Amino acid sequence: MSLLVVGSVAFDSVKTPFGAVEDALGGSATFFSASASYFTKVNLVAVIGSDFPEEHLSFLKSKGINLDGLQKVEGKTFRWKGEYGFSLNEAKTLDTQLNVFQTFKPVIPPSCRDAEIVFLANIDPDLQYDVLEQVRRPKWVACDTMNYWISGKKDSLLRILKKVNLLMINDGEARQLANEPNLVHAAKIIRAMGPEILIIKRGEYGALMFNGKTVFAVPAFPLEKIYDPTGAGDTFAGGVMGYLSKSKSFDDRDLRRAIIYGSVMASFNVESFSLDRIRHLTHDEIEARSRAFKELTHFELS
Amino acid sequence: MSLLVVGSVAFDSVKTPFGAVEDALGGSATFFSASASYFTKVNLVAVIGSDFPEEHLSFLKSKGINLDGLQKVEGKTFRWKGEYGFSLNEAKTLDTQLNVFQTFKPVIPPSCRDAEIVFLANIDPDLQYDVLEQVRRPKWVACDTMNYWISGKKDSLLRILKKVNLLMINDGEARQLANEPNLVHAAKIIRAMGPEILIIKRGEYGALMFNGKTVFAVPAFPLEKIYDPTGAGDTFAGGVMGYLSKSKSFDDRDLRRAIIYGSVMASFNVESFSLDRIRHLTHDEIEARSRAFKELTHFELS
């Protein structure tokens, strides 16, 4: 099934206790697309400025990503600058320059309008809605959001939530959206807003899925070296949606497997700055780490 | 194999957003013993004051717990008062009255000196060492500790760590003990201090085990109602050690299973104040929840 993502392409300047990068390739749609490209054909919809170098376009093309929906407009590309402490749990944003992203109106080109699976990365929920209207017959839709939209555009967010099958947010966002501290209870409240499936991202603690029938929990992969958590959530989403697009099934078994592949991709992503580790992955590495997840979590009762 | 625990028996006054109790039965050795009693015969070593009511002794005896090592001395029993906010992650201690616990010198009675498995709950590491000297031929020893001893009695702690097979602490304590923020790296450092196995308790996020051969991670059971997390760590330890005492095996397969049973017991414990839920558990309930843990974590790769 064809996969469409709309989100940001950006330059990230990131400092962690283990190093720093300036104006490195980033953005939700970039991390997502690169990750999903290991499983399926990805159609990317985003905006870049006139300063966006050809080498990044070549990289995305080398992953088979369709860039027909990548608008290039006069001006500077979206820039984000952040810093992480030793806990690596939360970024401290030092600077955000929306630049060409400020006036971004996603236009879905003809080659992408037949996409069957859509991922709406974390952008203005009104834009997420506009994107969905432009896709002819979306069969399965997932979206992300953040505290900024939950508090600032709740009505627009609730409108798009009625249209999505899967919402992927972190635990703080889930508690905020449901106005409920207990995650099991929060999941019920959020699922009643529209999405039949809720995946809660918990950073270094892994992920939880609620689909009404069962709850699935997976820990994050314990890594000795974590260089930069930037993009982990989007890389996770790319693995989840990429796998589902490949499996063409959304039953409990495939959703669990998708979450494992999402976790695998996120675990690689944090091992380097920007997309450096995701760039050069092999399918053997992905399969080996998915087996390592099995060993990490497996037990027999008797 | 016979199991011996040394720790505290206390009265807890606890307030959470869901209710409050005054002078309820608590203490590390109490939670541990009640939990382990579902798997094995427990020998309890602790101290109580002259105010300790007969009904609590009857309860412990009803669980088959040997109280020969429970010293009763003139004075008041150890009292702790704490409060939890909505996050339920960390208690705010409002008052600690050590009372008879202040001068506690554990004496292992003849009926307990042949214990093969020993759990040293979180007490002064010098007392933990004294206990171990009194046990004739301990085959397998586990211990707990806390930030107070890591910063205040490091040398004594390092002495006892050389004698233990398993250390069970939380993630903050592991980072502090190893002086290293990364848990995988911290586990290597701590295992080099003595314990071949390290179990890191992560509260609502579950537990991690490092045994040199593999890493095992299990999430906590997602519960809709969590009334009081007091004693969850000791109840977890009771399930782990109780199961190991019953299985008489410490291989990777049994360690993983032990951690599941520890997680099962902790998940029940937090569903009520004090030991109210642990008091009346059935083996069927324990088995049903262990199967629920399987469903929670199971996935197939292909």
Image (cartoon, coloured by chain):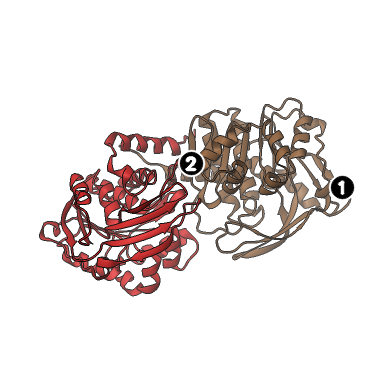
Chain colours: A brown, B red
The residue under the point 32% across, 44% down is: B276
Residue B128 visible to an observer of this rendering: no
Looking at the image, which is closer to me, B63 or B286?
B63
Q: Which mark is residue A73?
A: 1
Whole-Å distance between the Cαs marked 2 and 1?
42 Å
Badge 2: residue crowd in 10 Å (few <14, some 14–19, many ≥20): many
User: Given this view, does label 2 or label 1 mark the residue nearer the observer?
Assistant: 2
Relative to residue B127, is residue A170 depicted above or below?
above
Relative to residue B51, is residue A32 depicted above or below?
above
Q: Quadrant of the N terminus of chain A?
A: top right
Looking at the image, which is closer to me, B229 or B178?
B229
Residue pointed to by mark 2: A217
Residue A29 visible to an observer of this rendering: yes
Residue B123 in picture, x, y percent from top left: 30, 65
Q: Quadrant of the C terminus of chain A?
A: top left
> Is A19 left or right of B159, judged from the image as shown?
right
Badge 1: residue crowd in 10 Å (few <14, some 14–19, many ≥20): some
Quadrant in the rendering for residue A64: top right
> Is A140 left or right of B165, judged from the image as shown?
right
Residue A6 in picture, x, y percent from top left: 74, 40
The residue under the point 60% across, 51% down is: A269
The residue under the point 47% across, 36% down is: B299
- The residue marked by circle 1 belongs to what chain? A
Relative to residue B39, is residue B51 depicted above or below?
below
Q: Give yes or no for contact between labels 2 and 1 (Cβ–Cβ under 8 Å).
A: no
